[in-house]
Image (cartoon, coloured by chain):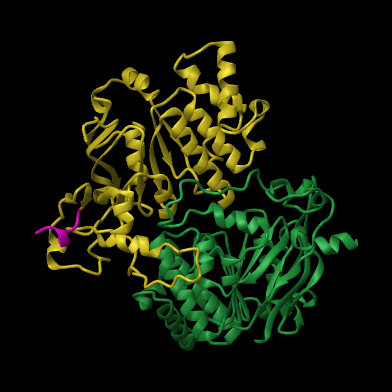
Amino acid sequence: MRDKLLTIENLKTHFFSDDGIVPAVDGVNITIKKGETVGIVGESGCGKSVTSLSVMRLLKDTPGRVVGGSIQFKGKDLLSLSDREMRNIRGNEIAMIFQEPMTSLNPVLTIGRQIKEAVGLHLGLEGKKAHEHVIEMLKLVGIPRAEEIVNEYPHQLSGGMRQRVMIAMAMSCKPKLLIADEPTTALDVTIQAQILELMKKLSAEEETAIMLITHDLGVVAEMCDRVVVMYAGKVVEEADIYELFENPKHPYTKGLLQSIPKLREKKNRLGSIPGTVPNPLERPPGCKFAPRCSEVFDLCREVEPELLPVGADHQCRCLLYQRDLVKEA
Amino acid sequence: MTVAPLIEVKNIKKYFPYKKGLFGKKGFVKAVDGVSFSVNKGETFGLVGESGCGKSTTGRMIMNLLEPTEGAIIFEGHDLGSLNENEVRDLRKDFQMIFQDPYASLNPRMRVKEIIAEPLVIHGLLNGKQREKRVHELLEVVGLSSYHGERYPHEFSGGQRQRIGIARALAVNPKLIIADEPVSALDVSIQSQILNLLQDLQEEFGLTYVFIAHDLSVVEHISSRIGVMYLGRMVELADKDSLYEEPLHPYTQSLISAVPIPNPRIKRERIVLQGDIPSPSNPPSGCTFHTRCPFVTDLCKSQIPAFKETRPGHFTACHLYND
């Protein structure tokens, strides 16, 4: 067993809106071990991005607040740290890259200046040393003409290059955990392939754990050791990568796997999940997936299932596998 | 094939003029630079490529939303370029478009029933009661209910809005539908609902689709023939099976190998292309792919490869196959 790096326990992050309380994250448990790549999959509104923002404590300017649970990183409870202590961890030990590299880079500062900021703050490198470190990082992420690019502005670069800069910035302080929120969604396929290769290489070399948030099951299959599937603010299934693709248990996971077209599969019709994700203000009682589930039975609409083991290193939140427990209750 | 194609695109080009700075030099962005293909009745023609390859511009030219700089588009024997505005509007009934962004393509101030009825109003088809009946019929065809017609677009989810866009496109009984990235803004489970709906409608109404997308798995699933574009040119065109089984153009090969496969057991040797897509305002000489091609030769840098039939029904523009 590798050491646990990040342990999220029963995390609840709610958004307080005029229309009511939106339980965006509603009791989520995730553990990430050292050097491991864990995929978090789910559709829009399932709470995968809010989970990552909660870990980074980046909810300050939103109506959202963590209302319960704990986030342990290397034994420290991130939720009880002061802002100053959190700043020392953010960007240094935990770094994040976002989907849209243009909006996450400052358009009026040169590339070099932006990376130097993190390097100066966390590694205490200044002047020539900082400059050299920045160029080294840019070369590491495969940016050609690194000596010239340091003096250029984000708008002078293409989308793929900007994402490389983001990765260079995130990796510049050798973080233990990299949170990547849809890092390749805005990129073209051939550029996506370059960025994924790069992330794989860097995580292997530096032993960086990656929390990869994505909706693309192809990317997950290629990158991850373990997968967490989320639906309506909760983890519905968690398993080893092979187990999840070969032996999915939750009807939602099964539905997802059947609805993606696969190259050379020659299927005339795709499977699909009827209906849409429930409005978070009006989530149904019982299992949140029950209204769209093909294997639903009466009890599902009353009892909320728990996330329980269904095999070695495999957990699932579904009453189909908990009938005995239900009978006892 | 003896059947006349529904639409024939002949060497179309679209150059957008630009000017660098106030007195700077003028130039052209060659968004589409000589593309030809034809689409047969009842088939789905897929158009794939990465951003900036000109696939959407091609779609817009077929829709007559953009005027080609050169070349001709022939729809059922009519050359769209030679028709006047009224004639084009009459013909427009026969081809409709579905857009990528279901949020931006529906007027937020109109009720859904008004949105769907608008093409009927424009073409002066049906009146009052009949029109309403047709709208209800269309809503049901795309899997919504007639009471949805009273609502406004913001009350719907992305997938439902795309259904509304499809209902609007179907209102005038078109023969051809151009779908520009119709599922790329949707979640996976919703994406498959819409793809299945498009297939059902095609069968029911005998529709012909031009399906524009960047996702190769989606295009493979829905299309019968596929054209691959790169920097404004068609680099390969073939029926689905030969394109995916035996891609000829090095760009198609790398594109297919770059698609992540949702199966963790499959470990592939991937052709990772170096570098970025060049700017279409200053495309490379010769074959536009030569800056990234693993098999580049001197010839590629100087001469544009001809788009030729390399195997029966399989066209490609690459010097590797021209001798």
Image height of B212 relative to B275, above or below: above
Question: Residue B113, position in %: x, y?
Answer: 60, 24
Counting from the top left corner in percent of width and height, residue B299 is at 12, 63
Specify whether residue B71 is in view: yes
Front residue (pair B280, B156): B156
Which residue, as the protein is rendered here, is positioned at the far left?
B323
Identified at 66% across, 62% down, the residue is A249
Seen at 71% across and 55% down, the residue is A232
Q: Which chain is the one coloured green?
A: A
Q: Position of residue B93 (x, y in %)?
A: 40, 23
Q: Position of residue B62 (x, y in %)?
A: 32, 34
Q: Which residues are magenta?
A: B317-323
In this rendering, the answer to whether B19 lies above or below A37 is above
Quadrant of the rendered image containing residue B80 = top left
Is A89 on the left-hand or right-hand side of A65? left
The quarter of the displayed image where residue B300 is located: bottom left
Give the vertical position of A292 relative to A34 (above or below).
above
- Residue A158 appears in the figure: no
Residue A299 magenta-highlighted: no
Chain B on-screen colour: yellow
Q: Which quarter of the figure is the N terminus of chain B placed in?
A: top left
User: Which quarter of the figure is the C terminus of chain B placed in?
Assistant: bottom left
